[in-house]
Amino acid sequence: MQTKLKFKIIRIKAMPQIEVEKMLNVLLLRRKKRYSQFELSFLMGQHDFYVRDAEDLAHTLVYTVPFANIFREIFDCDIQAIVPDVNQKPIYSIRILEATDQAGNTIYRAERQLEDGTVEFIAMFGTEEKDLQLEFAEPKDIVSELEVKDWVLGKIESGYFDVAKNALEIFDDCKFELKGLVRPLFLAKALKSCNGTKGLPKLNKKKDGNARFVYGKGN
């Protein structure tokens, strides 16, 4: 993010404050995990730009109630980390500031303003590139993209995908079996590459009864 931006306070009309705060809670959780907007959308089982749209304060998209349990699984947290407590003391309000960078992109700055006027910084955010890989504060042993792809191909051979599975199920199994940290981006790319071309097997992708994308050989 750029530091010399001219921010101005804006009124959020597309969603109530509780939804803004819920979005910010999820934003902080995904950044702690170093998940990009695309990666979280993938793990949620939604379209590529779902989280990008949810974090766009000019957009009307909000995280509905069913997503709370999905987020609890993804981030291994309790519901209080996601849904704000409207009775929390001291009372505060969420303040959003907006700026435009040199490329014409909208950048948001979120702050918490307490009753006594104290202002606490929450986060700065905006649109992320689809293939963004958020860096870790400390070096991590990250599983390579090729290793993840080989794992997917091996699972197809073993019959793992004979029963369709959602991205989070696949990701959890991949993390369990491979040594090191797995980037959701690498898994998403591996699944997408299995489209029946270039000698690769074909995985079908469709929505299940819970409106989440699932991947399988015969679904």
Image (cartoon, rainbow, N blue to C red):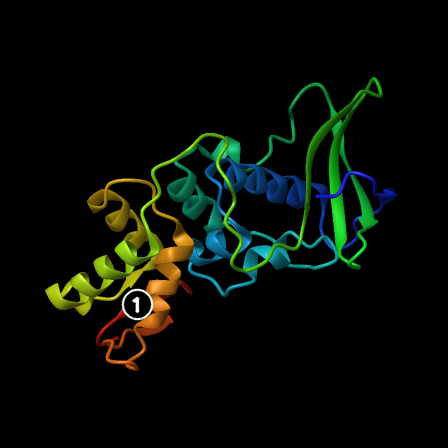
Q: Is residue 208 visible?
A: no
Q: Which quarter of the picture shows residue 18?
A: top right
Q: Describe the element under mark 1 as helix, strand or loop.
A: strand
Determine the residue located farthest toward the left in the rendered image. 158
Q: Is residue 20 visible?
A: yes
Would you place residue 149 above or below residue 55 in this image? below
Tell me residue 160's x, y (percent). 16, 62
- Quadrant the N terminus occupies: top right
| Front residue of 187 and 147 | 147
Determine whether, in the image, residue 214 is placed left or right of residue 33: left
Tell me residue 110's x, y (percent). 73, 38
Residue beneath the point at 33% across and 51% down = 144
The residue labelled by disc 1 is 215
Q: Which quarter of the picture shows residue 73?
A: top left
Residue beneath the point at 44% across and 58% down = 42
Would you place residue 132 above or below residue 94 in this image? below
| Front residue of 10 and 158 | 158
Graded by Cα atoms within 10 Å as few (under 14), some (14 to 19) or many (20 or more), the crowding at tag 1 reads many
Determine whether, in the image, residue 24 is placed left or right of residue 67: right
| Front residue of 8 and 211 | 8
- Quadrant the C terminus occupies: bottom left
Would you place residue 216 above or below residue 174 in this image? below
Would you place residue 78 above or below residue 24 in this image? above
Residue beneath the point at 85% across and 46% down = 10
Residue beneath the point at 21% across and 65% down = 153
| Total count of labels | 1
Determine whether, in the image, residue 129 is placed left or right of residue 188: right
Tell me residue 84's x, y (percent). 60, 34
Tell me residue 75's x, y (percent). 42, 39
Query: Label 1 amino acid?
Result: Tyr
